[in-house]
C-alpha cells in the first residue's frame, strides 16, 4: 500500500500488526572508499549541503573513512570496496545499492556522474551472485529512485518513508515500494532545497526516530511519522539538521552512529531520549567527507 496523506498513513498504520520476524537491523554492512576524493559539480546542482568552494583533502578523507570502517566493524561484519575517482560520490553507496533478504536492489540515480556507480560489476557480483540474491535493477528504468537516500525504512515494521524531490519521483517511489517488499510506503514532499530523506529523518531499529520537521514541505507529515515512536523521538532544529544530526543509523540495535559534528549538535535532552530508547551514541569524525554533501548514514550500505 502506498499513501500520500498524513491521515491515510495513520489509518493504514493502525491496520498493520507488528512483525517480530522482520529484521530491525542489518546483518552486515558495506562501504566504498573515497579514493581520489573530490566534489562532483553535477551533484552540487541540487545538493545545498555541498559547497564547491570548500574542496576536501583526499588524504584526510581516506583516513576518516578508514576510521569509520574500523568503528562500524565493532557492531557488524563489514566490507569496504575500492573507490572510483571518476565516480566522486561513490563514497555514498546506499543511494545505489541496497538489500533485503534475498534481493539486491540497484537504484536509478538522477545525475550521470552517479549512474556509472550502478555499473560496478564487483559490487553487483559480491552482493548479488555470490550471496545468491535476486537482482532488481532499476538503473535503466525511466524514473528516479536513489534508494535509501530517498527512502528511509522502518525495517521492523516494513514501512517506508519516501521523500519526493529531484532525487526521487513518484514512479521511483512505487518501484522501490515493490522492490523492497514493503507493507506500507508513505510518500510526502521534502521541503524546497532538500534532496534526500535521510538528511531529515532517521529510524533507529524500529524503536526511535530523529526528525527535522523543517525538512518536510508539510510538517504534518513529520508529526504523523513521529507519532509511531512515542517518547523516543528526537526533534531537531534547522541548525542540527545542517549538522547532519538526522543522518544517523543503528546497525546493532544498541548504538546509533553519526558524525562527530552531528553528535556535538545534540542537546542533553536529545542524548537522554536516545539513551531511554536503548541507544548509546557512536561518533566518527567525517569533516572532509561531509564536504561532499552527505554524512555517516550516506556512507553505509546495509546487508540484510
Image (tube, helix red, strand yellow):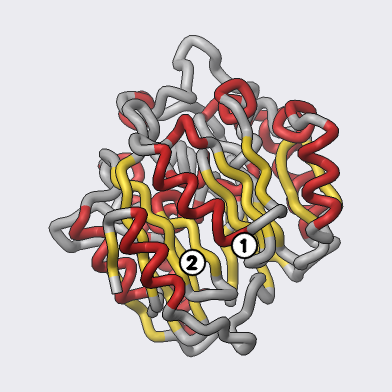
In this image, 137 relative to 27: left or right? left
Q: Which residue is mark 1?
A: 30
Front residue of 153/260: it is 153
Check disc 1: other Cα within 10 Å, few if <14, some if 14-19, many if 20+: many
At 42% from the left and 23% from the top, the residue drawn is 48
At 25% from the left and 59% from the top, the residue drawn is 172
Looking at the image, which residue sits at the far left? 142
Point out residue 113 in the picture as x, y percentages from the top left corner: 32, 40
SS at mark 1 in the image: strand
In this image, 214 relative to 4: left or right? right
Q: Are marks 1 and 2 in contact (CB under 8 Å)?
A: yes
Camera-side mark, 1 or 2: 1
Q: Earlier in the sequence, mark 1 or mark 2?
A: 1
Q: Quadrant of the C terminus?
A: bottom right
In this image, 167 relative to 291: left or right? left
Check disc 2: other Cα within 10 Å, few if <14, some if 14-19, many if 20+: some
Up/down of 20 relative to 7, above or below: below
Front residue of 244/21: it is 21
At 79% from the left and 28% from the top, the residue drawn is 264
Q: Which mark is residue 123?
A: 2
Point out residue 284 in the picture as x, y percentages from the top left corner: 78, 40
Up/down of 2 relative to 262, above or below: below
The image quadrant of residue 14 is bottom left
Amino acid at each position: 500500500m502506498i499513501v500520500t496523506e498524513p491521515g491515510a498513513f495513520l489509518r493504514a498504520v493502525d491496520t498493520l500488526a507488528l512483525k517480530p520476524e522482520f529484521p530491525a537491523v542489518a546483518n552486515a554492512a558495506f562501504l566504498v572508499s573515497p579514493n581520489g576524493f573530490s566534489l562532483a559539480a553535477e551533484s552540487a546542482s541540487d545538493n545545498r549541503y555541498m559547497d564547491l568552494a570548500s574542496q576536501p583533502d583526499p588524504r584526510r578523507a581516506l583516513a576518516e573513512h578508514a576510521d569509520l570502517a574500523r568503528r562500524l566493524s565493532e557492531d557488524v561484519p563489514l566490507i569496504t570496496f575500492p573507490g572510483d575517482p571518476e565516480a566522486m560520490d561513490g563514497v555514498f553507496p546506499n543511494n545505489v545499492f541496497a538489500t533485503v533478504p534475498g534481493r539486491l536492489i540497484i537504484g536509478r540515480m538522477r545525475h550521470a556522474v552517479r549512474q556509472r556507480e550502478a555499473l560496478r560489476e564487483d559490487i553487483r557480483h559480491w552482493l548479488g551472485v555470490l550471496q545468491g540474491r535476486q537482482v532488481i535493477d532499476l538503473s535503466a528504468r525511466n524514473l528516479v529512485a536513489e534508494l535509501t537516500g530517498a527512502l528511509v525504512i522502518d525495517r521492523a515494521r516494513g514501512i517506508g518513508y519516501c521523500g519526493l524531490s529531484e532525487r526521487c519521483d513518484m514512479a521511483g517511489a512505487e518501484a522501490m515500494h515493490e522492490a523492497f517488499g514493503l507493507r506500507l510506503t508513505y510518500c510526502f514532499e521534502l521541503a524546497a532545497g532538500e534532496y534526500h530523506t535521510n538528511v531529515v529523518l532517521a529510524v533507529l531499529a524500529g524503536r526511535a526516530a530523529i526528525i527535522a520537521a523543517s525538512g518536510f514541505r508539510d510538517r504534518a507529515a513529520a508529526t504523523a511519522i513521529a507519532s509511531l515512536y512515542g517518547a523516543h523521538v528526537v526533534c531537531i532544529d534547522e541548525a542540527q539538521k545542517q549538522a547532519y544530526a538526522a543522518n544517523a543509523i543503528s546497525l546493532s540495535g544498541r548504538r546509533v552512529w553519526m558524525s562527530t559534528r552531528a553528535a556535538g549538535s545534540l542537546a542533553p535532552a536529545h542524548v537522554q531520549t536516545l539513551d531511554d530508547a536503548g541507544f548509546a551514541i557512536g561518533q566518527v569524525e567525517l569533516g572532509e567527507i561531509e564536504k561532499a554533501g552527505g554524512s555517516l548514514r550516506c556512507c553505509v550500505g546495509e546487508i540484510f
